Structures are given as structure tokens and as C-alpha cells.
Amino acid sequence: MKSSFRTKTKMSFNFTFKRTYCQSSKKLSHVDEQGKANMVDVTQKESTKRIATARGSIYVGAEVMKLITENNIKKGDVLGVSKLSGIIAAKKTSDLIPLCHNIPLHSVKLTTTLIEDSYVIIIEATVSSEGKTGVEMEALTAVSISALTIYDMCKAVSKNMKINDIHLIKKSGGASGDYNSEIKVKDYTDVPMTQKTVFLGGI
């Protein structure tokens, strides 16, 4: 008698896939009725003053932190170059993110804070403009590229670096009004000034 395990059984399966969308009172502005990517038409919007602040951090480790504070990284002035890269990135946001509008920026300010005892660099960017769409993405892009620049300039010394907690802190202007972040991340702002060094920069 043949084992039942050797019995060959033909089975057919019929699967139907259906795209579903979240039912919410809020809609994604960059998605049309068919679920396709769409650049928002801002023609009818009123111009208002727009300000956005984003923040992020990068853990660099003891050796890299020491070299940065002594300005001994072979590629050069890490903090100065990272600041400039953040400013350039903010102005190039619409080239990097497909559905962002190309808008004139009035100001891009970057603040770099070194928490030397924790081997962490905090990057904060504030972007301002007057227009029909916000500058949140410009601020977030500035922080992101500034952090990546620090990584690039220091990776020959150590690759054990980590970029963390890039997020929007606050924004003002536009139809959606003001926003203040409720995201809980490690906050170094209460660290005594003896433990941190602040570098300011902007245009």
C-alpha cells in the first residue's frame, strides 16, 4: 500500500487583490483620487509668512568628537562644511524630493551643538519664506544633509556613527496653522554649558 504522503493532489488557488485606502477625514494632498502621486496645485492659496524648525542628532564617538573639537579631521572644518551643506540642501530640496515646490527662501539658519560628554552633535535648522506652501521639508532636508556631511567627513576615522531623531520641531504659517512637536526624544538642551559647545551659522 502506498503511503498517503506520496499521493499527488492538484490544488488551484484564486487570489483577488484589492487596493484599500484608510478612511480618514484628512487626505494626502500629494495623492489623487486614483492613488497616484500628484504635485499639489497651490495657485489659489494665499501667500503667508512660513517658518519651520527641524532638529536631529548624530552620535560620533569619543575619537571623532575629540578630532572635531580640535579641528583635526583631515577633510577639514567639519562643522563649517556641514553648515554650508545644510544651507545648500535647503535651497535644493525641490530637486531632491520630487513633489516639493521650488520656493524662494528668505533665510536658512543652522545651529550645531556639541554635547562633548555624550559624543553627540545636535543639528537644528530654521527656514523662513513667504509663499503659498510651507518650508518644513527644507528644514528637514537641511538637518539631514548636514548630518550626512558630518558622517562623510569623519567616516575615515570611524564608521561607528549614528544619525538619530530627525524631526520637525515647530512650524508656523499656512492654512494648517501653527505646529509644535509632541515627539519625545532625548533632549540635551538642559545639559550644563560646560559640557557643550555651540556653533552658530546661517545666511
Image: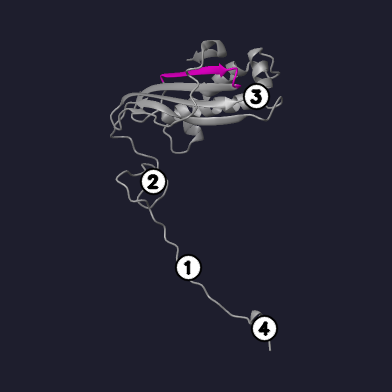
Instruction: Pick whichever, 182 or 146, lies toward us.
Output: 182
Answer with mark 3 or mark 1, whichever residue precedes in sequence.
Answer: 1
Compute the Cα span from label 1 to label 2: 27 Å
Which residue is the site of mark 3?
Answer: 61
At mark 4, the secondary structure is loop
Q: Which residue is mark 1?
A: 15
User: Three-letter amino acid code at disc 1?
Assistant: Phe
Which numbered tag is attached to residue 166?
Answer: none
- Assign a secondary structure to mark 3: loop
- Nearest the viewer among 145 and 116 is 116
Horizontal side, residue 104 vs residue 142: left or right: left
* Residue 137, placed above or below residue 197: below
The disc placed on residue 31 is 2
Camera-near label (4 vs 1) is: 4
Q: Is residue 110 above or below residue 9?
A: above
Q: What residue is at 50 percent from the left and 21 percent from the top?
A: 188
* Nearer-N-terminus badge (4/1): 4
Q: Is residue 142 left or right of residue 128?
A: right
Q: Residue 149: image x %, image y %? A: 60, 25
Say whether disc 3 or disc 2 marks the residue closer to the N-terminus: 2
| Residue 107 visible in image | yes
Task: Select label 1 or label 2 by which is in front.
Answer: 1
Write the start and end of the magenta stretch as one range.
106-119
Q: Which residue is mark 4?
A: 3
The answer to the question of whether label 3 and label 2 lie on touching residues, with beta carbons closer than 8 A, is no
